[in-house]
Image (spheres, rainbow, N blue to C red):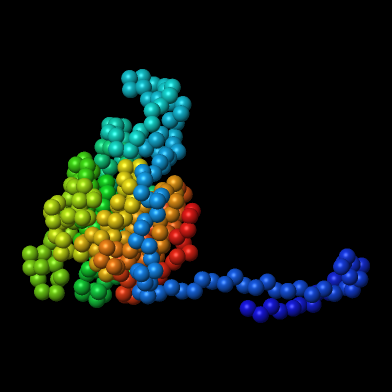
């Protein structure tokens, strides 16, 4: 940028120390240069390290402040007395522990935010979970929509062909949000039987317990597939050996969401499992939720087969960070542009 000069005339009676002249020269500051656009299809894996950062190879400590039903707001000073009124001091309610279902029917106030089931309330399992916050979910699905994940192939004739894999599904609120917005199929994976049974009830409540017909042009075989499927299994096994838990390894997914319990997994193992899973294919969008205490995920992740996951979003919402990647981008998803400037320590 070329700097320009502008003559500024001081009012009468005002003088500068630098000169007795009543005029000074002012330079217009240079405009901040934007980083050049990076085409994700041209990223060379040879220039990338296959070693994940050290911060991802350890268990993270991500304690959360008192908030809602997970840790009561009055946890430091109050405790429920089951047989009488009043309170003194409270106990923290850790994630995964049994919830008092008689007192809390829907402690998270979970509901569908958009689509055909907008406003539909969802049940919660009888264990304490940390579901994706409503404001985060709104931002996430706005981004998914911009990526074209819910677009019809032919408007008015062929339904959306997107297939969603929801890992660590909990009550199923993330996958059900996608189904409400029109995806063809969603597979829910969680290791807790209570979460899986709750997810099945929510699927039935929202009317997604139907069947997708197969046949020529369907892309799912002659026998078809259910609109929603719940798999009670370990997340890592489902990603690495899907055939052993009842998931067809030939059925590729266009969207994979991972919202794990922060302190119970090692993120390096999770990233390795999803990056090299047979369930993902070209242009698959992968969402990973992680805490700010973890640091930052890398912008590009190299696969074992030489492919790459390119980071397209990395946004912070309070103490939660949402990272999005696209697998071996071909340029089909035009709005999935590489954004390395977002993958910095937050």
Residue 222 visible from this viewpoint: yes
Q: What residue is at 87 percent from the left and 68 percent from the top?
A: 18
Q: What residue is at 92 percent from the left and 67 percent from the top?
A: 13
Which residue is more in the foreground, 214 or 345?
345
Which residue is more in the foreground, 214 or 65?
65
Q: Taking 122 as reference, is 12 left or right? A: right
Residue 117 visible from this viewpoint: no
Q: What residue is at 17 percent from the left and 64 percent from the top?
A: 251
Whether 103 is drawn above or below 261: the answer is above
Which residue is more in the foreground, 20 or 303?
303
Q: What residue is at 10 percent from the left and 74 percent from the top?
A: 216
Residue 78: image quadrant is: top left
Q: Taking 207 as reference, is 105 left or right? A: right
User: In the rendered picture of this protein, how many numbered marks are placed on residues?
Assistant: 0
Residue 116: image quadrant is: bottom left
Q: Taking 302 as reference, is 3 left or right? A: right
Residue 323: image quadrant is: bottom left
Where, quadrant-wise, is the N terminus in this rendering?
Answer: bottom right
Which residue is more in the foreground, 199 or 123?
199
Whole-percent x, y for residue 311 in the image: 39, 64
For this orientation, the residue located farthest to the top is: 84
Whether 65 is drawn above or below 321: the answer is above
Whole-percent x, y for residue 278 in the image: 20, 62
For this orientation, the residue located farthest to the left is: 223
Whole-percent x, y for residue 203 in the image: 21, 51
Whether 161 is drawn above or below 90: the answer is below
Whether 344 is drawn above or below 43: the answer is above
Whole-percent x, y for residue 65 in the image: 45, 38
């Amino acid at each position: 940028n070329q700097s320009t000069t502008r003559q500024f005339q001081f009012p009468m009676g005002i003088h500068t120390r630098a000169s007795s002249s009543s005029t000074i020269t002012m330079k217009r500051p240079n405009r901040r240069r934007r980083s050049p656009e990076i085409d994700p299809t041209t990223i060379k894996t040879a220039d990338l390290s296959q070693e994940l950062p050290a911060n991802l190879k350890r268990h993270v400590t991500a304690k959360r402040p008192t908030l809602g039903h997970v840790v009561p707001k009055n946890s430091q000073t109050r405790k429920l007395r089951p047989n009488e009124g009043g309170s003194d001091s409270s106990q923290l309610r850790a994630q995964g522990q049994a919830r008092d279902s008689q007192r809390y029917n829907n402690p998270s106030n979970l509901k569908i935010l958009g689509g055909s089931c907008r406003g539909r309330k969802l049940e919660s399992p009888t264990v304490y979970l940390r579901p994706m916050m409503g404001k985060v979910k709104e931002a996430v699905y706005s981004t998914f929509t911009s990526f074209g994940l819910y677009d019809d192939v032919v408007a008015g004739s062929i339904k959306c062909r997107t297939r969603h894999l929801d890992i660590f599904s909990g009550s199923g609120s993330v996958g059900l949000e996608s189904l409400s917005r029109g995806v063809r199929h969603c597979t829910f994976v969680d290791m807790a039987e209570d979460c899986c049974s709750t997810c099945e009830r929510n699927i039935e409540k929202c009317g997604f317990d139907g069947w997708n017909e197969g046949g020529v042009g369907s892309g799912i075989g002659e026998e078809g597939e259910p609109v929603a499927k719940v798999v009670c299994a370990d997340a890592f096994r489902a990603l690495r050996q899907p055939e052993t838990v009842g998931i067809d390894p030939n059925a590729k997914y266009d969207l994979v969401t991972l919202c794990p319990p922060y302190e119970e997994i090692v993120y390096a193992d999770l990233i390795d499992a999803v990056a090299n899973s047979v369930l993902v294919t070209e242009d698959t969008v992968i969402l990973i939720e992680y805490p700010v205490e973890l640091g930052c995920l890398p912008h590009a992740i190299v696969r074992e087969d030489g492919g790459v996951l390119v980071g397209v979003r990395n946004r912070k919402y309070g103490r939660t960070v949402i990272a999005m990647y696209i697998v071996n981008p071909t340029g089909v998803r035009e709005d999935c542009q590489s954004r390395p400037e977002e993958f910095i320590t937050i």
